[in-house]
Image (tube, rainbow, N blue to C red):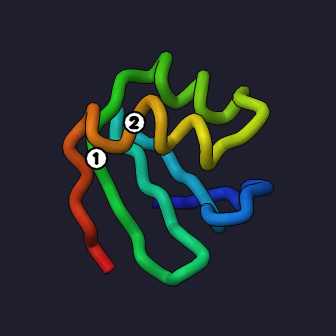
Amino acid sequence: MIRQAVKSSNIKSVGYEDNILEVEFKSGQIYRGKIPPEKFDELMGSESIGSYFYTNIKGKFPMTRIV
């Protein structure tokens, strides 16, 4: 999956394909999980990607650490 760099103090890049979100943290960890397209649009359009991720995705959708 191709990820794009984002402006965030904690998140390095984000990718989305076939309803699968992939998040790379600056720590090097990568998580992947299924989310609806509207959640991805809201994430990318949010003022703070990190805050949106922690408030609206983490703990609400299953995410699996892949690295």
User: Is 4 situated above or below 36?
Assistant: below
Image coordinates of residue 33 in percent, x first then y, are 28, 47
Label 2 Cα crowd, 10 Å radius (few <14 / some 14-19 / many 20+): some
Residue 64's label in the rendered image is: none
Q: Nearer the viewer, residue 19 or 64?
A: 64
- Residue type, numbered disc 1: Gly
Q: Is residue 57 above or below residue 25?
A: above
Please tell me whether mark 2 sits on a helix, a strand or a loop: helix
Q: Residue at x 66, y 43 (%)?
A: 49
**Quadrant (top left, top right, bottom left, bottom right) of the C terminus:** bottom left
Which amino acid, mark 2?
Ile
Q: Are marks 2 and 1 in contact (CB under 8 Å)?
A: yes
Look at discs 2 and 1 and give the one toward the viewer: 2
Coordinates of residue 54 in the picture (x, y in percent):
47, 43
- Residue drawn 41% across the image and 45% down it: 21
Q: Position of residue 1 (x, y in %)?
A: 45, 59
Q: Which mark is residue 57?
A: 2
Who's the residue at 78% across and 33% down the image?
47
Which residue is located at x 47 percent, y 24 percent?
Answer: 39
- The total of numbered circles placed on residues is 2
Residue neighbourhood size for the residue with mark 1, other residues' Cα within 10 Å, grouped as few (<14), some (14–19), many (≥20): some
Lateral position of residue 59 relative to residue 49, left or right: left
Of the pair 19 and 12, the residue shown nearer to us: 12
Q: Quadrant of residue 26?
A: bottom right
Q: Earlier in the sequence, mark 2 or mark 1?
A: 1
Tell me the residue that label 1 is attached to: 33
Find numbered disc 1 in the image and state the secondary structure of the residue it sits on.
Answer: strand
Q: Locate residue 62 relative to residue 25 in the image: left or right.
A: left
